[in-house]
Amino acid sequence: MEKYEELFVSIRKIIRAIDIRSRKLGKEAGITGPQLIIMQEIGRVKGLSSKEVSNNVNLSQATVTNILDRLEAKDLIKRIRSQSDRRKVALFLTDQGKETLLNAPQAIEENFIEKFSALKEWEQYQLISSVERIADMMGARELDAAPVLNLGELSASEQEK
């Protein structure tokens, strides 16, 4: 097997592991990985705007707005318009959203976080740099990416193009 083929096999294994984790999250919590990340951000900093959420989770404004619409439809978040400036809308978790967040499984495997955190700092940077280079080589520099990936959403957005 060629070296590039070995690399692609490893990448496919990573994608498969993410897919399995994403399906577990959907089954147990009824939300996707990106929805969880956005809910965690709203729970962490109350009253954020959608633009602030977008900046904080590294997703485009359009993607975040779409996810927020879905979360609001599920009654997991609420948008509250400012009384003093009607242009401003703050985001908050509903009681159901707080409960969902509390009961949701971890978005990223604890095992991964523990192992990665146990690496020396230079090893962490080396891994980050290597994976970023792979992403660049695959032409993925400009793609939206949250810390958690839901393959179903990626497939749907890629088909729209």
Image (cartoon, grey):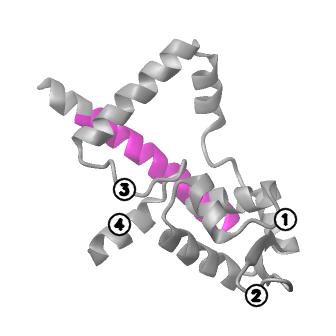
Q: Against 150, is 137 above or below?
A: above
Residue 79: image tag: none
From this viewpoint, is residue 27 visible? no
Mark 1 residue type: Glu
Identity of the amino acid at label 4? Ser
Which is more N-terminal, label 3 or label 2?
A: 2
Q: Position of residue 124 (x, y in %)?
A: 52, 21
Q: Position of residue 76 (x, y in %)?
A: 75, 74
Q: Residue at x 61, y 79 (%)?
A: 70
Q: Is residue 152 visible?
A: yes
Residue 99 is labelled as 1
Pointer 1 and pointer 3: residues touching (CB < 8 Å)? Answer: no
What's the distance in space between the residues labelled 4 and 3, CA to CA?
A: 13 Å
The x, y position of residue 138, in whole percent, is 23, 44
Tell me the residue at 83%/73% (across/down). 96
Return the residue at label 2.
86
Q: What is the spatial separation of the Cα atoms under label 1 and label 4, in whole angstroms?
A: 29 Å
Question: In the displayed structure, would residue 128 be above or below residue 57?
Answer: above
Q: Is residue 36 above or below residue 136?
A: below
Residue hosting label 4: 155
